[in-house]
Amino acid sequence: MTQAEAFILHQQGWVPNNERLPVLLYRGAVRAEGRKAAEAFEQRFADHGWRPQWRDTIFDYHHYHSTTHEALGVFAGFATLQLGGPGGKSIDVQAGDALLLPVGTGHRRVAGSEDFQVVGAYPDGMNWDICTEAPSAQTRARMTALPLPHRDPVTGLPDPFEAGGDA
């Protein structure tokens, strides 16, 4: 078993981030690339109660989601991502890596290979939005009240943010 990298991102300018739940980064969560990796991530996410909804790149502008947590599985290429908004944390990811972003976490693609692609998945029953400005009081209240997912999208363990990201 490998340990996920876990880190908390504090509010950064207009990006709220999530000061109580960590970002989890799983290196080498899937040992495949391309179509096989996409299918492996989709199956794993679905098996753990996270509905895969799209395959694409990550937007190159800062944004966050206020209605759901997000799982991202890199299935092709490599990229540098900036997490936390302007001035946030830069991380490099490659095919096989996965991320669990708690609600409110700012993210964008800074650079990457032309073939960089990810699978995006969300806890069953949750729909995503795209936020590019500071949250209102109502939005903050919605984010705070959002329930925790029942299982980690990568490992399937209960209480993913509390389990410390064991994989």
Image: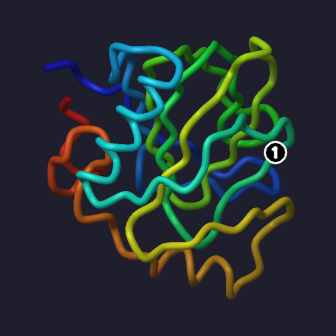
Estimate the x, y position of residue 48 in percent, counting from the top left.
Answer: 25, 53
| Residue sitting at x 50%, y 25% | 35
**Depth check: 70 or 162 in front?**
70
Name the residue that disc number 1 marks. Answer: 62
Report the label total.
Answer: 1
For the N terminus, the image quarter is: top left
Decide: is 54 above or below 148. Answer: above
Decide: is 106 above or below 135. Answer: above
User: Callout 1: helix, strand or loop?
Assistant: loop
Estimate the x, y position of residue 148 in percent, counting from the top left.
Answer: 33, 67
Q: Is residue 5 left or right of residue 83?
A: left
Q: Amino acid at mark 1?
A: His
Q: Is residue 86 left or right of residue 48?
A: right
Residue 131 occupies which quadrant of the picture? bottom right
For the C terminus, the image quarter is: top left
| Residue sitting at x 61%, y 59% | 104
Mark 1, residues whose alpha carbon is within 10 Å: few (<14), some, or many (≥20)?
Answer: many
Decide: is 19 above or below 118. Answer: below
Q: Is residue 5 left or right of residue 62?
A: left
Estimate the x, y position of residue 76 in percent, counting from the top left.
Answer: 59, 19
**Depth check: 137 or 63 in front?**
63
**Depth check: 14 or 45 in front?**
45
Residue 22 occupies which quadrant of the picture? top left
How does the figure colour the protein chain or chains? rainbow
Extreme bottom residue here? 138
| Residue sitting at x 61%, y 15% | 92
Q: Is residue 122 left or right of residue 50?
A: right
| Residue sitting at x 24%, y 23% | 3
**Depth check: 119 or 143 in front?**
119
Decide: is 107 above or below 90. Answer: below
